[in-house]
Amino acid sequence: MKKRFLSVLGMAMSAVMLFSACGGSGTSSNTGGSTSEPTNKAVVTTSGGGAEATGTTDKDTLVFVMNAEPTSMEPGATSTGDSYPRMTNIQIYETLLRQKMGDKTTLEPLLCDSYEFSEDGLHINFAIKQGVKFHNGDEMTVDDVAYSINKALAMPNVQELADMIEDAEVIDDTHVQVNLKYAYSPVLNILVNPAFSIISQKYYEQCQADGTNFGRNPMGTGAYKFVSWQNGANIKLAANENWHKGDVAIKNVEFRFMADATTAAIALESGDSDIFYGVDSADLPRLRENPDINVLSVQSAGFYFIALNTDGPNEALKNDKVRKAINMAVNRQEIIDGGQDGVGWVTECPITPGIFGYQEDFHADPYDVEAAKALLAEAGYPDGLTIQMKTPESSYYSRPAQVIQEELRQIGITVDLQVMERGAFNTDVGNRDYESIYFWIGSSFPDADNIVYKLFHSQFAHSGLATNMACINSPEADELVEKGRQELDPDARMEIYKQLSELNNENAWYIPILTSTNTLCARNYVNNAYGDSAAYYYIADWSFNRE
Amino acid sequence: MHKYVIKRLLMLIPVILGITFILYSIMTLTPGDPVRMILGDGATDEAVEQMREELGLNKGFFEGYVDYLKDAAHGDFGKSYRTREPVFNEVFARFPNTLKLASSAIAISIILGVLVGIIQAVHQYSILDNIISGITLICTSIPDFWFGLILIIIFCVNLKLLPASGSDHWYNYVLPAITASMGYTAGTIRLTRSSMLEVIRSDYIRTARAKGTDERTITYRHALKNALLPVVTLIGINLGWQLGGTIIVEQIFAIPGIGTLMIGAVRSKDIPLLMASVTFVAVLSSLINLGTDILYAYIDPRIKAEYSK
C-alpha cells in the first residue's frame, strides 16, 4: 500500500519538475548589440533606451499586454474615449485620416488621397483612395465610406462626439462629402476617431442577416487581420498581406489582457511580453531602471481637477472667496508626489498641456496657506467649515484626494471624503448630487473646445452628464466659450482661451490639479514604439530590431 | 438513496431562486447605472434612454425579475450588457480554465495533503512533525496574492523557467495551481493528521496491533480508510470553493476564468452576466456537495445504511 502512495508522490514530483523544465520554451529572445532610441518628438520622457538594446532575430509575434479587455470591436459600439478597443481597432480598421506617428496634432491621409473644405466650412470633400481592399478581398468603395460614417453617426456612443456632423454622401465614384451642421475647425480630428472606421457594408449586412456578432468578428482594411478572440485572455491578429500601404514588419500581434498591473509589469521584465499599456505608477521606477525596457510617457489628453458645485447643497461654495481660498490651499506638486508617486504634470489652467488652447505661461493663484485662511475669515468662516468631496474608487482618484483632504485641513476645511464605486459616482455626478468632486476630464481630440465647451457652458449645468460639474451659470463664460467655437483665427482663439482660464481662476469654479501620463512600456528591441496621449498606437509603424 | 438524491436535486430550486433574487436586488437597488458605464461620461440623454430601452432596463423591479425568471425557464439567460453575447457563451468559454486550475490545485492538495498528514500522524511529536506543523501554519497564513507574486519573481523573472501569464499551455498552470493549492494543502495536511491520530487510538487498531498485524498494513489499510472520511468532506468543500473562481489567483496570473469574469461583471454592473455566472457556480457547488455526500455512502457503509432507512 505504501509503495503505491510513494509512486503517486513520485509521479507528482516528476510532473512538477517536468512542468518547470519545459516552461522556458514559452519565450524566445536573443541578445544583440545595437541601440535603438525611439525618435519621436511627442515623447516627453524616455528612459532605459540609452543602454544597450536587445535585438531579436527569430521573433515574429508582438505580445501587447493591456490591463483591460475591449467589450466590442465594432466601430462606434464602445465609448469614443475608450482606449482599449481603440488599440485593437486601429490595427484592423482604418479611418480617412490618421495621426502621424505619435504626434496628435498632425493628421495625414490614410483612406483618402486628399480633402478640401468648402468656403463656408460646412462641407469637406474627400478624394477616396482607390484600390484599397478589405481583408476578405472585396474592394472598398465610396458607398462603404459613406455608409460607415453614417452608421457611426447613428450610434448612441458617437452622437455626443460628433454632433456637428450632419451626414456623409457619395458625390461620384471617387469622392465622398461630409456635411456639417455648423462650421467647426477641429472636425477632422473627430473623423480620426476609430468610431469612424471604414467597414464593408456588404460584410456588415451579411453579419446582421446571419446573426454573426460583427463586434467579435471584425473586418476592415487595416494592416492587420483579425484571427481570434479568446474571452478574457487575448485577441490575435495577423499581418494583412494585401495592405494598401505595403508590408508590415511585425507579422503577428497578440493583445493579452492582464488585470493585475504588477504581474503585467513583471511579464514585461521577464520578456513574456513586448509592450505593456496600463502600468501602475508604483512599478514605474523599477521599469525605468531596467535597461531592456523603454518607458514612453506622454501627457495624457485630460486632467484631474476639483469641481466645486456652485449650485449645490453647500452654501459656502456659492461664495467665491471660499472657492478662491480652496484654490490657494492646494499644493499641486505635493499632490503629484504624494498621490501619484511623482508621476504627472502640474496643471493650472483648465486645458490640458499638449492640446490647442493650452496656456503655457498661465499661473493660477499661488499656493499660500495664510492668504487662504485670511480669505476664509473674510468670507465669514474664520473657524473653518466642512465640505463633502466625492471621488471614484480607483487609486488614481482616491490617493490624490486624500492629499487634498490633508491640505485643506491646514486652512481649517474638513473634507468629508467619500470614495465611491464608479457606477454610483457617475449617477451622482449626473444628478449633481455632491458638494465637490475630485474627477478627471479628457478631450477626444486635441482642441480646447472639446473640454471647455462641456465644462463651462451654462446649457450643460444640469444636463445629467459629466459636463459643467461646477454648475456654472456665467454669461461671461458662455460668451467666451461660444466665441472660441466659432473663431477660425488661431491667435484669436488662443487669446479667448487665455481669458477663459483667467476667468476660471478668478472664480475658482474648477481647480485644475494635474495632468496624468499615458505610458507605454516597451522592450527596447521594438523599434519606433512611441507614447501617445490617447493610445493611438499604430503597430504597423513598429518593427523588431533584427540586429 | 434515489429518494435522497432527488430530494437534494429539488432543493436546488429554492437555492437558485434565492440566489438570483438576492443578486438581482443588490445589483438593481444599489446606485450606479450600467448604461452610463457603457456609454461613458459624455453620452446624451437620448442615447442613454435608447440603450436603456434596448437592454430592457426600463422595467419595474419585480417586473424585471419575473421576466428574467420567465426567460430563464425557457433557457434564455439574456445577453451581457457589455459584449452583447449570450451570457452562457461567456461563462462556458471561461469555465474550462477555472476547471483546469481548480482540479490541478485540488489534485496537488490531495496528494501532498494526505501523504504529509499521514507521515505526520505516524511520527507524532517528532521533530519532523513539528517542522511540518510550522510550515503548514505559515502556508495557511500567507496570502495568495503575495505568494503568487513571489513565485512569479523567482520562476519567471529570475530563473526564467515559466511564463508569468497566459492560459494556452499546460505549463501556464503550474504556478497558479501551486499558489491556489497552498492554503488547501495545508488544511488537508492538518485535518488528515488529526483525523489519523484519532483513529490510530481507537480500539480496533489496538486489536489489529494485538493480533500482530504489520504496522504498515495497520496505517494504510485499517486506519487510513476511516481517517479519510472527514478529509473527503473537506476536499468536496475545497473543490466547490475553487470552482467558484479562485479570483485572486486568476487575477494575478491573468487566467481568463470564472473569477475574473465575475469581478468584471460586478465592476461594470453587467447584471445578466453576473447572475448567470454566480448561479452557475452555485449550482455547481451544490452538485459537488451532493456528489461528496454520495461518495461518502460508498466509503462508509454506516452512512449508506442511514440513507436506505
Image (cartoon, rainbow, N blue to C red):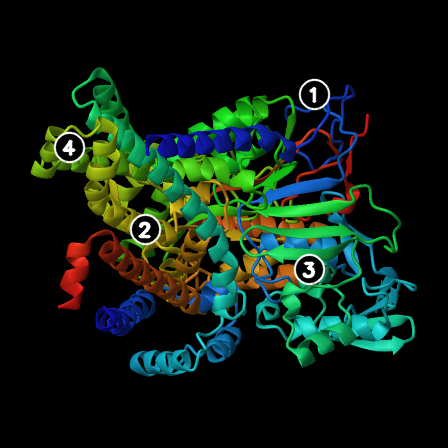
Viewer-nearest residue: A26 or A121: A26
The answer to whether any part of residue A372 appears in the image is no
Image vertical order of residue A221 relative to residue B24, above or below: above
Q: Which residue is tagged 1?
A: A50
Give whichever of discs 1 and 3 has the lower sequence position: 1
How far apart are the two marked residues, 4 and 1, measured between alpha carbons? 64 Å
B160 relative to B204 in the view: left or right: right
Callout 1 secondary element? loop
Image vertical order of residue A200 relative to residue A2, above or below: below
Letter of the chain that mark 2 sits on in the rendering = B
Mark 2, Cα crowd under 10 Å, few <14 / some 14-19 / many 20+, is some
* Percent coordinates x, y for residue B85 in the rendering: 54, 69
- The circle drawn on residue B241 is 2
Callout 4 secondary element? helix
How far apart are the two marked residues, 2 and 1, measured between alpha carbons? 49 Å
Mark 1, Cα crowd under 10 Å, few <14 / some 14-19 / many 20+, is some
* Percent coordinates x, y for residue B143 in the rendering: 32, 35
Q: Which residue is tagged 4?
A: B197
Name the residue at 27% across, 38% down.
B188
Image vertical order of residue B189 relative to residue B32, above or below: above
How far apart are the two marked residues, 1 and 3, measured between alpha carbons? 34 Å
The answer to whether tags 4 and 1 share a subunit is no
Q: Which residue is tagged 3?
A: A194
Residue type, label 4: Leu
Closer to the eye: label 2 or 4:
4
Letter of the chain that mark 4 sits on in the rendering = B
* Percent coordinates x, y for residue A477 in the rendering: 51, 59
How far apart are the two marked residues, 2 and 4, measured between alpha carbons? 27 Å
A310 relative to A409 in the view: left or right: right
The answer to whether tags 1 and 3 share a subunit is yes
Callout 3 secondary element? helix
Name the residue at 21% across, 22% down.
B123
